[in-house]
Amino acid sequence: MKVKKENTPKTNSIKYAFKTLDFADTFSTTNHKNSLETITHLIFGTMPKWISRLMYLRNVLVKLFGLKTEMAKEFNSNFKPGDVIGFFKIFSVTNNEVMLGANDKHLDFRVSIYNSKEPQYNIKVTTLVQYNNLFGKIYMTLIKPFHVLVVKCMVKQAYKL
């Protein structure tokens, strides 16, 4: 098994990401060969075609509701807070965790990529969501099954033994 569901780690970045946490999940994989920056790029740098198509459909639909749909075309090579990776803004970078995310009118979310240094499943990818209104809750309820499939697939891209 290259990816498994786990309990949310108790890092400071995760603990203080939001005042109210409405949704969280964590998937892990093993990678002791690459830096955290490279691992982040492995996870978010390429999307399988089916995910790209799903994101395109999502963007067409949510644009009707005025939600954000733009994505940066390339990774920013500086990899520091304030830079952008794909759709995500970098909020913080430490030696063992990167916090990415975005804020929108319906919900705010963060994604933590954390290296626990454990022998197996050391890379923990945690999604955190705070709803900003009822639409955020409805949106998350609708996309949750797709979210799980997409995140598992993307985390699997970082697997290296």
Image (cartoon, grey):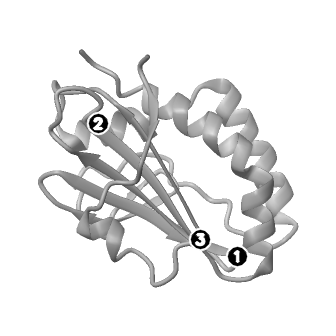
Circle 3 packing at 10 Å, graded few (<14), some (14-19), many (20+), is some
State the residue position of label 2.
39
Identify which residue is drawn at 17% across, 27% down: 119
Mark 1: which amino acid?
A: His
| Among the two numbered marks 1 and 3 on one chain, the one whose residue lies closer to the N terminus | 3
Q: Amino acid at mark 2?
A: Ile
Q: Nearer the viewer, mark 2 or mark 3?
A: 3
Q: Considering the numbered disc 3 on the image, is that residue within a helix, a strand or a loop?
A: loop
Displayed quadrant of residue 149: top right
Whole-number angstrom distance, CA of label 1 to CA of label 3: 13 Å
Callout 2 touching callout 3 (CB < 8 Å):
no
1 or 3: mark nearer the eye: 3
Whether tag 2 and tag 1 are in contact, CB under 8 A, the answer is: no
Q: Earlier in the sequence, mark 2 or mark 1?
A: 2
State the image coordinates of residue 22 (x, y, percent, origin top left): 59, 71
- Tell me the residue that label 3 is attached to: 22
- The total number of labels drawn is 3
Q: Who is closer to the viewer here, 1 or 142?
A: 1
Q: What kind of residue is marked 3?
A: Asp
Residue 18, position in %: x, y? 44, 78
Q: Nearer the viewer, residue 7 or 3?
A: 7
- Please, is residue 92 above or below residue 146 in the view? below
Image: 117 above or below 64: above
Number of the label disc, if any, that sits on residue 106 = 1
Name the mark on residue 71: none
Structural distance between the alpha carbons of marks 2 and 3 = 27 Å
Please determine whether, in this image, residue 53 is positioned above or below residue 9: above
Which residue is rendered at x = 71% and y = 41% of the image? 146
* Helix, strand or loop under label 2: helix
